[in-house]
Amino acid sequence: MGVGQVRLILALMLLIGSGAWALPGAPHNAEGLCQRNAGSLFFDGMQPTLLVVLSPRMPLALKEWGRMRVVAQQEGLRVVVVRDPQVSDNEWQGAVAKLGVDDLQTVGEMAQALAADCGLLNHTPAALIGRCGAVHPWPILGVMPSHSWSLLLRARVDQLSEVACK
């Protein structure tokens, strides 16, 4: 890992660790429809959950997802995968078959409105982390190295550990 990558990771950790994500002015999904709808649909349990939207239109999303899923599971996250609602079932099935990722054949489509409300349509993989009905307001976008992915997942889970479960 180069010096630039280490600096970027440290800067992200400082920002994430500062609690700035909870301040007013956070992305629109900090409160409102995403919080209310995604929280009750996907993040109702005590175990931290990673909701991931995948699309074959991003070249690395499906290829790298298996590795990223393993890292998320090693971090103790329950993983829920949905497909980008902008991708037809035929396109999805063709891409999954071509890459030989059979475990993704039965992935359901995320609702278009919810994906838009949560900021999950512009780049994939796009992920949210939540627990106990609460959703971290910042989506995680794109493929990243395992170590960086692990650090980011841990930071988000740590922030959500302050959420009281009912």
Image (spheres, rainbow, N blue to C red):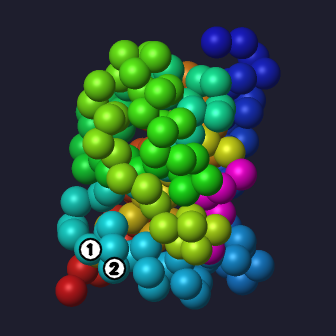
Marks 2 & 1, CB-CB < 8 Å contact:
yes
Q: CA distance from mark 2 to mark 1?
A: 5 Å
Relative to 66, residue 110 above or below: below
- Let me know if residue 79 appears in the view: yes
Q: Number of numbered discs present? A: 2
Q: Which mark is residue 44?
A: 1
Quarter of the image where one finds residue 1: top right
Quarter of the image where one finds residue 139: bottom right
For the view shown, which residue lies furthest in the front direction? 90
- What residue is pinned by disc 2? 40
Q: Nearer the viewer, residue 33 or 160?
A: 33
Span of residues in magenta = 117-122
Q: Secondary structure at mark 1?
A: loop
Residue at (34, 45) in percent of width and height: 107
Relative to 46, residue 146 above or below: above
Residue at (65, 34) in percent of width and height: 57
Q: Position of residue 95 (x, y in %)?
A: 50, 26
Quarter of the image where one finds residue 102: top left
Q: Position of residue 123 (x, y in %)?
A: 68, 45
